[in-house]
Image (cartoon, rainbow, N blue to C red):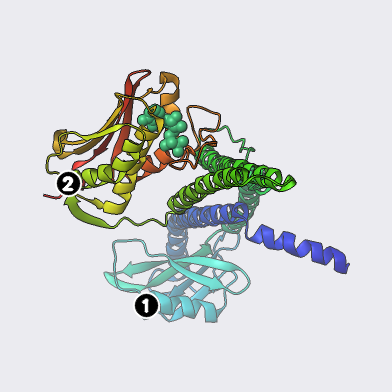
Amino acid sequence: MKDSLVTLKPHLAGLLHSIRLRLSLWFSLVLALILVLFSAFVYYRQTQDVRESSVARLLVRQRDLYGALVAASREQNTGTSWPPDSSVDFDLEYEEVFFLTDPAGQVSGMWGRIIIDQAEQVSAKMKALPPNRDSVRAISFRMDGRGEYLFLPTPLYGDNRLLGWMVLGQPADPLGQLPRLALTLVLGTAFTLIIALAGGYWLADRALRPVKTMARTAQAIEATGLNRRLEVQTRDELGELAATFNAMLDRLQAAFDRQRQFTADASHELRTPLTIIGLETDRALAAARSSEDYRRALHVIQSENAFMTHLVSELLTLARMDAGQVALKREPFDLSDLALEVAERFAALAANKGIRLQTGPLPELAVAGDRQYLSQMIANLVDNAIKYSPARDGQWVRVETAAGPDQSAEVRVIDNGPGIPAEHLPHLFNRFYRVDSARSHNVDEAGPAEQPPGSGLGLSIAQWIAHMHGGRITVESQPGQGTTFRVILPNDCRSI
Ligand code: ADP
């Protein structure tokens, strides 16, 4: 018993909080209100009808009895004495009552089942009515045990003076129509409401079934298994909700997938140098080596360390970007100044490789942006241009700026290096994407690597910086001829 109560309770609570029940209750409440108003209207109209037909009947009977009354008073005493006494027998219909009063309303004779008390009360009511001789004034009066009666008073005149009143009474509703109608209306209303409540609940249940399905599916979806989708195919509001929910799941899944891919790629990138360091130390320690061998091993370790340091700092930048923790510190400066500064920083590196680092036209370009991030963006592009150009004569890298259309500002990094095959261009800005899928850093047996090798993150970071400034990066490349990276910063980055 206790157990069943325990299981019943949450069920009951769920039912009470369910939209289905509330919907059907509200629906029934509104319907009840309409039905009550409608019933009241019907009942009121029927009351009027019954009263009107009763009055019509009374008028007919009034004429009959008036004739009988005149005849009786003539018969009794040649018309001078008024009123006829109660011994005169009038021909009354079933449940009909009849009494006479003097002009002051004093009861002077009664016929039918009526007592003096009742007749006097009716007479008092009659006197209380404002005088109006034109319209028919029926008086309703409740007779003990016999329900509502209608009394119709008629003034009696003789020799141009009021002799008294003839008051005729009949049951207001002789056929008992009104109680029957009331019962029918109450039963009809109750019956309709029960059906409406049950039907409303059923309808609401049917309409909201997809919500239940959606809730169940949503419960079954976990962060790790985001591949399930809601199956609401309808084109109504719920279908729209399901589609929105599914679209959100798509985005979440894509984000999770990206995250997973990112972690996997990052781990993979870090594992390679760690493995190389491990192998190199094992080899060095396996036997007594010459100092030259040790130097070489340390160079390898240094190079891998430089790669990892660079990679970790890039990963940190990406993590901050993803977390939305990066706030740009916008300040006004000359973009050409910045481009020149970056080019100067790379001059030694380029010279080392025999590459001519030139600066093209650098017109004054006032912009408002984060100087440090924009510097990193240009540096990544220049770094790539030098890194991927072969160390041979005639190689050059040029950095230039220009004012673009609509007040935009442009930085171009151009090289005549190996270029990038067209099929790689659409993926170039993806994280960890490298044209040469083998690791692009090779351990230089002869000495330390001159610069950290590529991790495939430089361009995605550069693109993110451009996006944060509302701008974009484009790339044009001809394999064998060279590559041009173009950063376009929109006019709201310009400070006039
Ligand atoms: P990485 O850190 O490996 O340089 P990036 O995202 O900066 O990664 O570049 C992605 C790839 O694009 C590089 O692996 C390289 O193959 C190619 N790339 C970038 N810039 C140039 C360039 N100026 N010339 C030729 N290839 C380039």
Q: Residue 377 carries which label?
A: none
> Which residue occupies 73% across, 62% down?
10
Q: In front: 202, or 472?
A: 472
Q: Which residue lies furthest to the right in this view?
A: 1
Residue type at mark 1 is Lys
The reply to whether residue 208 is visible in this rendering is: no
Residue type at mark 2 is Arg
Choose top left, top right, bottom left or bottom right for residue 401.
Answer: top left
Q: Distance between the residues labelled 1 and 2?
A: 100 Å
Give the mark nearest the N terminus, 1 or 2: 1
Q: Do the residues labelled 1 and 2 touch (CB within 8 Å)?
A: no
- Classify 201 as above or below 438: below
Callout 1: few (<14), some (14-19), or many (20+) C-alpha neighbours within 10 Å? few
The residue indicated by pointer 2 is: 494
The residue indicated by pointer 1 is: 127
Secondary structure under tag 1 reads helix
Q: In front: 176, or 152?
A: 176
